[in-house]
Amino acid sequence: MKAKPALRWILALLTFTATLSAAELSPGEKEWVSKAKRFERRGWIYLHVEGDGSARGFQHGYLLAREIGELLRVHRKVWEYNSGMTWGWLVKRASELMTPKVDPENLAEIDGIVAGMNARGIATTRDEIVAYNAQLEFEGYWWPQEKKRLADEKTAPNRERCSAFIATGSWTADHGVVMGHNTMFDFTEAVANVVLDLVPTTGQHILMQTQPGFIHSGTDFFLTAGGLVGCETTIGQFSSFDTNGVPEFVRFRRATQDTRTLAEWSDVMRRGNNGGYANAWLIGDVNSGEIARLELGLKYVAYESTKDGYFAGSNVAEDRALLRLETERSPTDIRKSAAARRVRWKQLMSENKGRITAAKAEQFLADDYDVYLEKRQPGSRTLCGHFELDAEQFGGPEPFDPSGTFDGKVVDARLAKQMRFIGRWGSADGIGFFADRFLRAHPQYDWQQGLLKDRPSQPWVEFRAGE
């Protein structure tokens, strides 16, 4: 009798774990591991780590070694296919430009991840994990400029990333902060399914979404014990980068762990800004009810805050100087994803003023209304983005590009004060993705065979720190 698919997967995982050539742990490493925790829930992996940088990193690398190793395999193949350059070449460049700018605590955590993975028989290095953590900014912002220098080509535009909002005051049902965020990304690397419960020896207790092997969030959905919540959407059509600046992943981690106010958090993000992974940050203080938007370009930075209003993100810069002088994005062409989603956010916020709750936020993130077609039709222009279903995309990726929304997360003030949030793994509207079926229908993407993975529909579930 054949085993059922779920049972086969469990048996394969047990076999893999049993055959890892794990090194003998020292007494200190055994103590570190005994304080960590991992479990899985509806597509998510919950990971608790605590202690100093070395301890947290070792716990992370040891308990997620298999997942990190697989993601490095996939990312290496995607990078080499898209760039034509070797992974080793990129790691070397990252070691020269990024590693020296990582602060000691973050570097200790990275070294801990390396040690934890090596202890499980999966080889990696400090520079590889730095390059992996820096992929969003280094490959998305430094590489287009370097490619242009090497090949004299036009700088490639940034892809569409994420839909998000944050609201407070008279816009929400209880006048407290409500925030929602979903992430759009290439499905080969839509892997940020880790809920990281991080308790450092100094600084803020953090609960954030991330992907295996990251010391930052990447998708950038977080809450802290000090009462801060935050998320972001990428500023589209932006490509500036300063190699002398501090990496974005380093600044994010320092800001989130080391600060307690919106102003302090924003100040850390501005300090040493390299332009990499340029985002419109939506942040809130659930204790005071204040929310803010920090649009972090390179030459132009905009900050505004309120205790009665909302901010929404759809990859369009709202600051006029930043929009016109550092991007090439149209805020009004609703044939394109970003402008269409920007209009849809305005509609939903207006229609639901005074009634916005966490439950409403779930509905917003799953919204499939196309303002250009004026009907409900999942596609590249909907808040819950489905590029993989879109036959005709204007100014975006190619038809049926295997990318789009792969999650949804919501939080309100009540949940945040208890260090809890609600998340959905897979498309926020519940539409599943199945790799073999997709590749049979769209063989032009057959190079992604073995890289694309199924993402079936999952329910909304709750997580809390300290589970």
Image: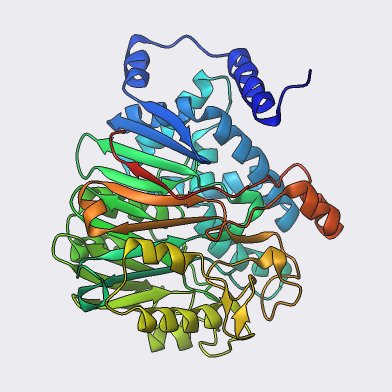
Residue 21, x across and y down, in percent:
59, 13
Give percent across and percent down for residue 90.
61, 49
Residue appearing at x 67%, y 67% in the figure: 387
What colouring style does the render use?
rainbow
- 63 above or below 24? below
Q: Residue at x 48, y 61 (%)?
A: 182
Location of residue 82 (image quadrant): bottom right
> 206 or 416, which lies in front?
416
Does residue 192 appear left or right of residue 432 in this picture? left
Up the image or down, 141 lies above or below 100; here it is below
161 w.r.t. 30: above or below: below
Q: Is residue 171 above or below residue 91?
A: below
- Residue 1 on image: x %, y %: 79, 17
Is the C terminus in the top left, top right, bottom left or bottom right quadrant? Answer: top left
Of residues 330 and 193, the one nearer the viewer is 193
Which quarter of the picture shows residue 297?
A: bottom left
**Looking at the picture, how far across and down is residue 53, in whole percent?**
32, 33
